[in-house]
Amino acid sequence: MDVVEGPEDAWVRLNDRIGRLRRHLEGDPFDRTRPAAALASALDDLGEVLSGSGRVSEAVSAGQESVAIWRGLLGSSPGPAAEHAPGFIHALANLGCWSVEAGELERGVAAAREAVALCRPLADPSACVPAAHRLLVFVLWSLSVCLDAQGQHAPALDAAREAVTVLRPMADPQTGDPDTYNSHLATLLLHLCTRLMASGQWAQALSVAREAVDLFREPAAAQDRVPDDLAGALGNLAACQFRAGLWAESLAAGQEAAAVYRQLARAGSSREPGVLAFNLSAALTNIAAALIDGGRLSEALTAAREAVQVLRDLPGSGMALPVPPEQPLAGALNNLARTLWLTGREDEALAVGQEALDLSRSLTGPVRDVFIATTLGNHGYWMLLKDHRVQALTALQESTTLLRRLADPVTGNPDLHEPDFATALCNLGAGLAGLGRFTEALAADQEAYTIRRRLAAGANRAPAPHQAGLGISLNHLARRAAEAGHYETALLRAREAEAIFRRLVGADLSPVHSPRLAALLADTSVWLLRTGRRPEALAAGEEAVAVLRRLADRTAGNPATYEPPLAVALSTLCACLSAAGRHEEALAAATEAVRICQRPAAPAAGDPTATSSAVAAALVVRARQSAVMRRQPQAQADSTQAVAIRRHLADQAAGNPASYRADLALALDVLARSRSIGSDFPGALLASGEAVQIYRELIIDAPAHYLEHLRETLQLQAHVLLELHRPGDARTVQDWLAAHPPHAE
């Protein structure tokens, strides 16, 4: 059986050879050319051993000496330059990669460029230099690595593509030698795939990843390459398939990659333990993402936790990693935080997310902004869901600013970062709308829509994810239109979004599209009601509840994730049922919504702001329905509690934003109605008067958004004034209503 030489053995052997060559050169001044070339070659080999062992600075020193010797031989040799040129070119290319590893980017790129420039003439058929094309492939690969490290992603991709183009004829089954070159082609395709992924060209990357995996599986490639090359190709394939919306295929590839890395770890692979841990963690992160899209959240959480633990178990120092250790840990933590949130572990998710953010801020280089933007984007979105509007907007604004710079068409990488930038803009729009900044919200949502419309139409893009993004942006634009009272416009946007989501749900690409469709249908039911289309509204509301009830099932579903949107859908269904005259069913739906929202309301659990805000919203709906059914005690109890919660949230002295006052005004309107049906007209006038005052202040900056609410409360107030025998005051209110009709569509 052959004995594989380890790095230490190779280092000892090469050092011994280098020592003997140095002594020979010192002792024989008349025969220097041949031993000098041998010394330069041995130093180049030593650099490869040192670099592979993580001793990069020593590798650079060996490479510099090798290059200097070769350069001297080329300058003084009376024979043909081609005799020493291949060794010199090889050493230059290696020195370029090692210099980049050591952080000397400009020196590394310069060495790699020189190597390519020298190699191109040798690869010309007229030069008759053996193996010159194979050498050109190597130096092009080195140049690609160096350029990418310097942030020159497009030239790096060009160099990788050219290397593949040069190598393909050598591996051609008809005219080349596939047994010799397929393994090299597979490795080079793996590199090209990584460059394509980094450039955001996911469709091309997917095709290249599939070819690389196929080649690595071939017996010839398997004999020449260690299994983790296959695992690397599988990892890339999993990431590309996930981007294409193929979660099941992505899961299978990720699981196979993880199995290979586990096998290598058990077998005591010659690979650095840090590198194996890094790769296994990345594979587990891919697995978790695919499982989330597949709706298998408990399994996703297991994978996400292991991805973090694998990295935490590494020693604190002395490990060779392709990137700083904080980088993979920050990424794994961010993925874990997202998974924790989706499984209802909100407090743990926020703590893990904060750790990810702290690590991200400690990073250096371009990747720092990427990690910070991603982590802040998640945090801001979660704050939106918890109704922490100011904190949400602060995080979302920073995330959007960073992603705008990263996606800049001149200074950034739009192919890679535009999809995330569009997501950030969409979330920013929601955050701005939550604070009453509707004009800015519309601008953010419109910009996101423009990007996503273009991405969804792109021929070279993975269609499903961009189609889903377009559907989300259309839903957001529909909400902005509805907030301004433009319900027909909202419905036009919603119908297009609905068609997209129904197509995605019908294709059974991922369970994540069903809740998006349900949320859209719940919104649509409200807008249909506003335009008098009651049967359509009821059908949409019932479908939304049916979908979310299945997703939130306590046995087969995920109640932690889907009960909150179910409560919202039940509240909208209440309005639809009430409009259809089915009042008992409407009250039952509203009561179920209240019960869901009150479930996590224990002081020791959950977030008080998020919980109380959701409870108040559900109580307002039930109070309104109770008032419609003339059940005054229930209506007054619910509306009184809702006003108390919302008055606390709207307390500006406690630092809460003024936008909460719109919610307070709505609760006050319902309280006034409940008092009115109980003939407490003075109390109804007091509550409606406070609501009117709030709306009058809000209408100054956003008339289109609050006029309808103000009119509804004033109509109630006019009725109350008549009951109090104040016809003059009632007439004043009615005159104002006549002078301020509803906005036309």
Image (cartoon, grey):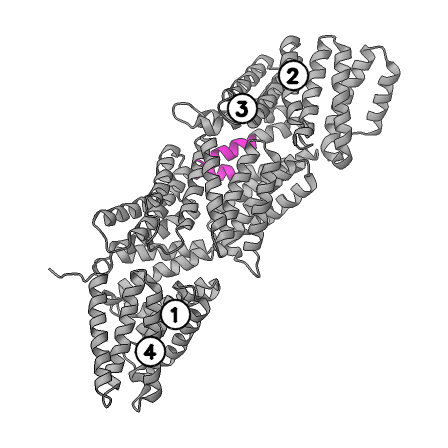
The percent coordinates of residue 480 (x first, y second) are: 65, 37
Question: Earlier along the polypeptide chain: callout 1 or callout 3?
Answer: 1
Amino acid type shown at disc 3: Ala
Quarter of the image for the C terminus: give it. top right
Element at label 4: helix
Residue 225 appears anywhere in the view: yes
Question: Earlier along the polypeptide chain: callout 2 or callout 3?
Answer: 3
Q: Nearer the viewer, residue 212 or 113?
A: 113
Question: Earlier along the polypeptide chain: callout 2 or callout 4?
Answer: 4
Along the horizontal axis of the image, is 224 left or right of 740? left
Q: Nearer the viewer, mark 2 or mark 1?
A: 1
The percent coordinates of residue 20 (x first, y second) are: 20, 77
Circle on res. 105: none
Along the horizontal axis of the image, is 207 left or right of 741? left
Whether tag 2 and tag 1 are in contact, CB under 8 A, the answer is: no
Is residue 460 depicted above or below 301 in this figure? below
Residue for badge 3:
567
Residue for badge 1:
96
Which residue is depicted at the point 33% across and 55% down? 320
Whether tag 2 and tag 4 are in contact, CB under 8 A, the answer is: no
**Quadrant in the picture for residue 621:** top right
Element at label 2: helix
The percent coordinates of residue 257 (x first, y second) are: 30, 48
Element at label 3: helix
Circle on res. 88: 4
Residue for badge 2:
639
* Alpha-carbon span between mark 2 and mark 1: 72 Å
Residue 576 appears anywhere in the view: no
* Alpha-carbon span between mark 2 and mark 4: 83 Å
